[in-house]
Image (tube, rainbow, N blue to C red):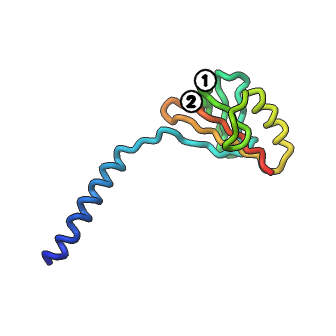
């Protein structure tokens, strides 16, 4: 019995330490993965954009500001909002364009908007 307790005690300590560490974690960024129709891109580089999780869902506003970056294709260099809007217009004709909107949950500010125009 003592041997079993000696073996389980370090495991219990590790488990408790892990649980207390996990409680301290906070989401710094979340992401929406949406079809192109689920996103209303901003008209200006500062202001707001709208995202809609499903066809029957209400639109949710996200703010965009001077720190928001726009990308066409994942892992590409940043582009201007005008270039993103032009690429989105072209991508609308394709089969499976997606938009990934990375945002801060507390402030609801979009930090990155990434268009993946598909094949």
- Front position in the image: 107 or 75: 75
112 horizontally vs 12: left or right: right
Task: Using a 10 Å C-alpha cutoff, classify the residue at mark 1 as few (fewer than 14 neighbours), some (14 to 19) or many (20 or more).
Answer: some
Q: What SS does tag 1 mark?
A: loop
Residue 109 shows which numbered tag? 2
Q: Are marks 1 and 2 in contact (CB under 8 Å)?
A: yes
Residue at (16%, 76%) from the top-left corner?
A: 3
The location of residue 60, given as percent across then percent down, is 62, 34
110 horizontally vs 91: left or right: left
Residue 56 appearing in the image: no
Q: What SS does tag 2 mark?
A: strand
8 horizontally vs 57: left or right: left
The location of residue 41, given as percent across then percent down, is 72, 31
Residue 112 shows which numbered tag? none
Residue 85, picture quadrant = top right
Residue 114, picture quadrant = top right
């Amino acid at each position: 019995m003592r041997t079993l307790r000696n073996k389980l005690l370090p495991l219990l300590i590790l488990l408790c330490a892990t649980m207390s560490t996990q409680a301290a974690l906070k989401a710094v960024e979340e992401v929406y993965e949406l079809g192109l129709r689920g996103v209303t891109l901003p008209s200006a580089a500062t202001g707001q954009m709208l995202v809609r999780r499903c066809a029957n869902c209400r639109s949710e506003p996200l703010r965009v500001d001077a720190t928001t970056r726009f990308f066409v294709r994942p892992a590409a260099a940043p582009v201007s909002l005008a270039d993103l809007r032009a690429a989105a217009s072209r991508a609308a004709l394709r089969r499976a364009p997606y938009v990934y909107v990375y945002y801060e949950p507390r402030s609801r500010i979009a930090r990155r908007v990434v268009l993946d125009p598909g094949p």
